[in-house]
Amino acid sequence: MPSATSNWLSLEDALEHTLALTPTVTASETVSLPQALSRIAADDVVAPANVPPWANSAMDGYAVCLSDLTQSDRLPVSATVLAGSSDIAPLASGTAARIMTGAPLPSGADTVIMKENAIEEDNHVSFTNMPAKGDNVRACGSDITKGDCIISSGTRLTPAHLMLLASQGITTVKVYRKVRVGLMATGDELCQPGQPLQAGQIYESNSTGISALLSEHGVEVIHYGIVKDDIDALKRTITEASQQTDLLITSGGVSVGDADHVKPVIDALGSVDFWKVAIKPGKPFAFGRVGNMVFCGVPGNPVSAYVTTQMLVTPVIERLQGLGQITSPLRLQAKLTSSLTRRPGRTDFQRAMMSTKDGQWRVTPLPKQSSGVMSSVTQANCYLELPAEQSHFDTGQWVTVIPFSLRTNMENA
């Protein structure tokens, strides 16, 4: 007899379907570097100049022609070369030049000896260590050669990319236009934060959390607020969104309850390609399209909405943006601190705390794993990812964890 989850898509299959059915925005614009952070490069960027533009010193020290040291281990100091110097005279044969970090290497010199390895007396210098030819010299174009492709089309621009562009004297860059993402919450029970709660109401928090998750992806967010469980109101709002956005994310209304109207409305206006993904939390996730707009329906429970946005919606956004290579969360191995038993059938993202001991990662799941308990996410620093087919995990077993951040508390701090 088939299991209850046999007709649900695995996380991997759901990702494959969404990416195959999601188009890429092709319109582009040219923006200044401060505006380009987290945007996607629309063209290859070619270096207009060599870096460094001329051979220079990597250290404070003395520029020499190494062959001169075979004649004498004590050389007169003939010049001083500072960073930013121009019209530098060639190095006089048989002499050394004081040189500062970043200063252009005088012609005739081929090596820089560190100041720490030099003894200067009476305007002459001798050296305690014999260098190799080319030591501490950064050759012209050793970092970047003029004409090199320094950023490929489809790259998400990070602070490091912007610094690289600025180092080339570049002030603008061509990027794909921002993807427009609509956010809509559904449910008669929802109330906007800041308003007084009526009997039976709860505050709508999913839009705030999802919008914050999307902030690092450089998208334009359009808020459609709370839409009641009314078919006509849903049709009006979703139709409006289909004319204004590339992606609509709804929360709630995609399960099988009597008031869950979002999925049938999407079906009437466009198509629902699949729903029900074998993950926990987050089973009732729907994916479809209305005209040119992609639709992602996340569950109404806060943790489910949060997890499905991270695991399923983020790749859709990356595809829409034209990212050259879709990313996935960083996964590490950690030892489980206590045994764990759970019902198999779905990939489980349990909220947990990871820490280090004796140089090894350890992970402890939090006691509250309900999809309605958002505090479990704020108290955790990682997801413990449990494979769908496995029900029991032993103390000390190696398991997969997904850190929330690349930074963590210092060990033994």
Image (tube, grey):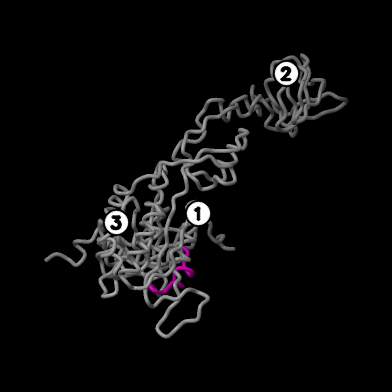
Disc 2 secondary structure class: helix
The x and y percentages for residue 25 are 40, 44
Dot 1: few (<14), some (14–19), or many (≥20) neighbours within 10 Å?
Answer: few
- Residue 101 figure quarter: top right
Question: Residue at the location (48% across, 63% down)?
Answer: 355
Disc ID at residue 69? 2
Looking at this view, is 205 or 341 the one in front? Answer: 205
> Which of labels 2 and 1 is toward the front?
1
Instruction: Based on the picture, tell me whether residue 111 belongs to the magenta stretch.
Output: no
> Which of labels 3 and 1 is toward the front?
3
The x and y percentages for residue 333 are 40, 56
The x and y percentages for residue 120 are 82, 28
Looking at this view, is 190 or 208 the one in front? Answer: 190
The amino acid beneath tag 1 is Glu
Magenta residues, start to end: 369-381
Q: Are marks 3 and 2 in contact (CB under 8 Å)?
A: no
As drawn, 183 above or below 179 = below
From the image, tell me which residue sits under label 1. Answer: 216
Looking at this view, is 227 or 109 the one in front? Answer: 227
Magenta span: chief secondary structure? loop
The x and y percentages for residue 91 are 76, 18
Split into 4 quadrants, where in the image is the C terminus? bottom right
Mark 3 and mark 2: Cα distance apart in space = 74 Å
Disc 1 secondary structure class: helix
Disc ID at residue 288? 3
Instruction: Based on the picture, tell me whether residue 374 belongs to the magenta stretch.
Output: yes
**Which of disc 2 and disc 3 is earlier in sequence?**
2
In the rendered image, the residue lying farthest to the bottom is: 199
The amino acid beneath tag 2 is Leu
